[in-house]
Image (spheres, rainbow, N blue to C red):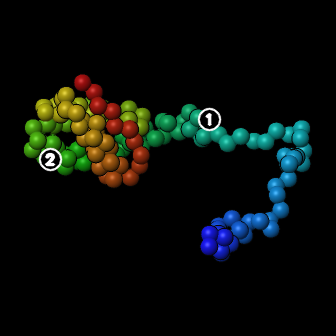
Amino acid sequence: MQDQSQSARVTLFDGLKSRPARPATKPQLVNPEVPKAQPVAIEATDPGAQGMRAALLARRRPLIEAALEAIRPNLQRDGGDCQLVKLEGDAVYIRLSGACVGCQLASVTVHGVRQKLIEAIGMPLRVIPVN
């Protein structure tokens, strides 16, 4: 009876049996003298990109301050607080105070602040807590 059940079983790989095997050799480049171009990040090659990003972030400082002011009541309700220290490049430096100092969930708070700031200004940024 086991032979009948195994012969009737259809697996996912049954359709691949008639497919030819892959060639054993690696495909050759058309012109082996010319090396293949490697993808390069724009920011790594363009030093002005960081400057433009920093200028854009500086123009959005009022939006960042407004988003932090919207977050502060929730933190104050739990005995903590946060304030904007400085903007540098694409980084926003904040200072956590009150009950947030030494809290085990401070990293979760910083992540939540980052998410709210990204929603407010519409561009990715880094949020760095300072003492």
Q: Is residue 54 above or below residue 9?
A: above
Task: Sort mark 2 into few (<14), some (14-19) or many (20+) by Cα contacts within 10 Å.
Answer: few
Q: Quadrant of the N terminus?
A: bottom right
Q: Quadrant of the C terminus?
A: top left
Q: Residue 121, can we see it?
A: no
The residue at which mark 2 appears reads as: 74
Residue at the spot 29% in from the left edge and 49% down from the top edge: 116
Q: Amino acid at mark 2?
A: Asn
What is the x, y in percent for residue 80?
Answer: 13, 36
Whether residue 103 sits left or right of residue 124 in the image: it is left
Whether residue 58 sits left or right of residue 62 in the image: it is right
The residue at which mark 1 appears reads as: 45
Give the camera-side residue of 100 and 61.
Answer: 100
What is the x, y in percent for residue 23?
Answer: 85, 53
Q: Earlier in the sequence, mark 2 or mark 1?
A: 1
Q: Residue 52, can we see it?
A: yes
Numbered label tally: 2
Residue positioned most to the top: 131
How far apart marks 2 and 1 lie (CA) works out to: 42 Å
- Circles 2 and 1 in contact, beta carbons < 8 Å: no
Residue at the spot 83% in from the left edge and 62% down from the top edge: 20
Q: Amino acid at mark 1?
A: Thr
